[in-house]
Amino acid sequence: MKFRIKNYQSGQAIITAVVFFLLVAILLISSAVIYTTKRASGSNRLLTSRKSYFTAEAGLEDVTYRVMKGKNYISTEVLNIDDFTATTTVVNTVGSDKEITTVGNAINNIRKNKITLTTDVGADFFYGVQSGAGGISVGNGTAFNGSLYSNGPISGVNNLMYGTAVSAGPSGLINSIHATGTAYAHSITNSTIDKDAYYFSNVTGTTVLGAKHPDNPDLPLLDMPINDAKVQSWENSASAKVLSGCSGGSLTLNTATTTGPAKIPCNLILNTTLTMTGPIWVEGSISLGSSNVKIDPSLGKDSLALIADKPSDRLNSSNITMTNGAQFSGTGDPLSYVTLVSMNNSAENNGAVIAIDVNNNLNGDLFIYAPHGLIDIKNGSKLIGMAGYKINIKNNATITYETGLASMLFESGPGGSYYIRKWEETQ
């Protein structure tokens, strides 16, 4: 008899292999599930965090809008959006400034945003010199450390300008200027451009060291950086106090004076130190001789305006004349400047009366502004910047643009509107 013995070990090996591969598959699937779950959880946390942020933004914007528009609000406001909450608190800080903080909570994901409001009225100047349709004309030896933006032509005698030159609109023309930066105009003639030239029509008699960009759309005409309504608000603030002492149509100051906000109901002749503690409105013309106009250091970052405006006669009055080395200084803060404002509108009406007449050796923390008039700059003047309807810059004047000018802050007096000084996320 023959016996056949079965080999059971081969079957067990197969079962062991199946179990092993099954365990490996389970391990891989489990790892994939865990990884996917973690990724999904991370995405959910990120999404929830973003919801918390935007909830905080919604609460912050809601209360900020109420404060800026003078609507009702309480010191702590709670906003609910889709079961998420934004808790906003309003705290008074320096003077009438306010700090508004909002905490957003979305399923215990916390984001915190903050806005600082101030009642100062801001004004933005992005160019060293800006003109209206009257344009900019420059003489021999004039130097610019900044940029020019004009709604009219820019013309000169190959003056060196350290910056960008823009003559905006369909009539834009740059003529006989040497710009170390880029030039923009409808047409460019007889100039030297160290960088690129952007133009719509043509370039003639001009050396362009960079690239030429023909058929470039004309740049837009810009509004003046301070509108008339803002100047009126400064005058309203100054009207809270009216100075006496006018004689023969003028107030002459020969001894050091500290004042502001204040209104002078006649012309002003200044031959001394004037310390400003608020905006000053001269209802007439201003003559500045050997004088020093400065802003009280206690005002910190603020700038103040000295305004010449006689509403009943803006064609022949409302102008400013400066001679004999008048000096100007802010509070000492790099954002603080004296701003001279003339509301004379002779140039805008094709007249020849000068709105702001700047003579020799004028310098300091000064910005001059004549939105409807002619600014005439003489030899040797060194300014921070200027803006006017029409600007004539005579021989050897120097214009230096400082970056702090881009965020000048003007104290508007009681009842001034709020604006946002800082907006940031703190958590």
Image: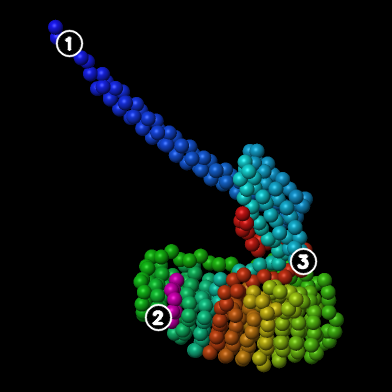
Q: Is residue 168 left or right of residue 254?
A: left
Q: Which residue is mark 2?
A: 192
Q: Is residue 47 left or right of residue 307?
A: left
Q: Quadrant of residue 130?
A: bottom right
Would you call the spot at circle 1 few (<14 residues within 10 Å), some (14-19), or many (20 or more)?
few
Q: Which numbered disc, 2 or 3, marks the residue closer to the eye?
A: 3
Number of the label disc, if any, that sits on residue 95: 3
Does residue 181 show up magenta in the picture? yes
Q: Secondary structure at mark 1?
A: loop
4 shown above or below 206: above
Q: Residue furthest right?
A: 244
In magenta, the rendered stretch is 178-184
Q: Secondary structure at mark 2?
A: strand
Tell me how far mark 3 sits from mark 1, CA to CA.
111 Å
Q: Secondary structure at mark 3?
A: loop
Residue drawn at the location 67% of the way across and 46% of the way down: 86
Count of numbered circles on the image: 3
Look at the image and tell me whether residue 131 can be seen.
Answer: no
Residue drawn at the location 77% of the way across and 50% of the way down: 74
Quick one: label 3 or label 1, which is nearer the N terminus?
A: 1
Q: Is residue 200 left or right of residue 426?
A: left
Quick one: label 2 or label 3, which is nearer the N terminus?
A: 3
Please state which amino acid type lies under the numbered disc 3: Gly
Number of the label disc, if any, that sits on residue 186: none
